Amino acid sequence: MNKSTLYKGCLEPIIMRLLKDNGRMYGYQITQMVKEITKGELQITEGALYPLLHRLEEQGVVETEMENIGNRIRKYYTLTKAGKKQTSVAMDELKMFMQSLNLIVNPKLA
Amino acid sequence: MNKSTLYKGCLEPIIMRLLKDNGRMYGYQITQMVKEITKGELQITEGALYPLLHRLEEQGVVETEMENIGNRIRKYYTLTKAGKKQTSVAMDELKMFMQSLNLIVNPKLA
DNA sequence: CGGGTATACATAATTTTGTTATGTATTGGT
DNA sequence: ACCAATACATAACAAAATTATGTATACCCG
């Protein structure tokens, strides 16, 4: 009965959205921002995030830059041009989905 | 790029919600009602629905009755008492999740 | 009357995707 | 010295959906 499983399927568009808004982000930063924005409701696990980011890179949705912060490495992700287009589409779909969810959860509005 | 994959993880609460609203439903009816309510946006596949219903029955969330319609059989599902309680919890979680999604997709409201 | 579509169930093989666990390594506070 | 936070990564596993398939009745159309 773990509520966190709800976002299965939505994780990808969520990440894409954050990247679109913030331009350039690294993985850990994404997990923290999601936690912050949702007041701790959504917690993205690293085991879900990193493989997803790698997949998006393979697909040409994002591109990466490494940056050294002191002796520590950060891997920054940015949406490619194609990735931005895909994000727009994904956002439309996500919004439609949210409306659909709403219609089901809130049938009185029908 | 199938938008339908978005509801992965939300299917169970969606079904529970419909059962709570409509009292007694059969599988095919559920697929049709979801399609109708969401104007064709959400299409639940049978391969996802039936195993889910069976799981819910095993877990004591729903109980079933067979009914003969002509020569055809319908299997009706109803929430058990425990199932109704779980549905309330699931709805709270789903609403929280929807709010979280909103915060991410609609950051301007922050 | 034959064929396609809708109704209505079910399940198996496969794929996708997330959880859990683990590993490495730096940084900073106490 | 030690623990928590930062920051990456990946492997083993589990859950849950897709896709494909199967069975069977009912109904409409040409």
Image: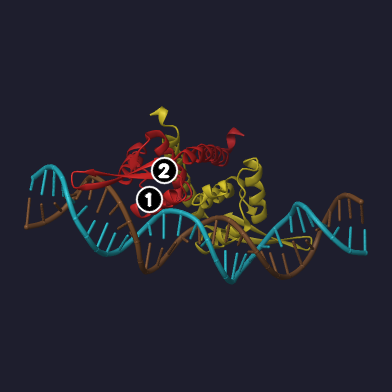
Chain colours: A red, B yellow, C cyan, D brown
Which of the 4 image quarters holds residue A101?
A: top right
Query: Could you tell me how far apart the alpha carbons at marks 1 and 2 are, in whole angstroms?
Result: 9 Å
On what subunit does the disc labeled 2 rest?
A
Image coords of residue A73 (percent x, y): 25, 47
Coordinates of residue C16 in the picture (x, y in percent)? 50, 56
Classify B1 as above or below A36.
Answer: below
At 47% from the left and 46% from the top, the residue drawn is A10
Q: Residue at x 57, y 40 (%)?
A: A100
Where is the C terminus of chain A found, in terms of image quarters? Answer: top right
Mark carried by residue A15 = 2
Q: Quadrant of residue A70?
A: top left
Question: Is residue B98 toward the left or the right of residue A36 in the image?
Answer: right
User: Is the C-beta separation of discs 1 and 2 under 8 Å?
Assistant: yes
Residue type at mark 2: give it. Ile
Q: Which type of secondary structure does the marked residue at label 2 adopt? A: helix
Count of marks, rendered view? 2
Give the answer, above or below, for where D13 lies relative to A36.
below
Q: Nearer the viewer, residue A104 or B71?
A: A104
Q: Which mark is residue A49?
A: 1
Height in image: A15 above or below A54? above
**Observer able to see residue B16:** yes
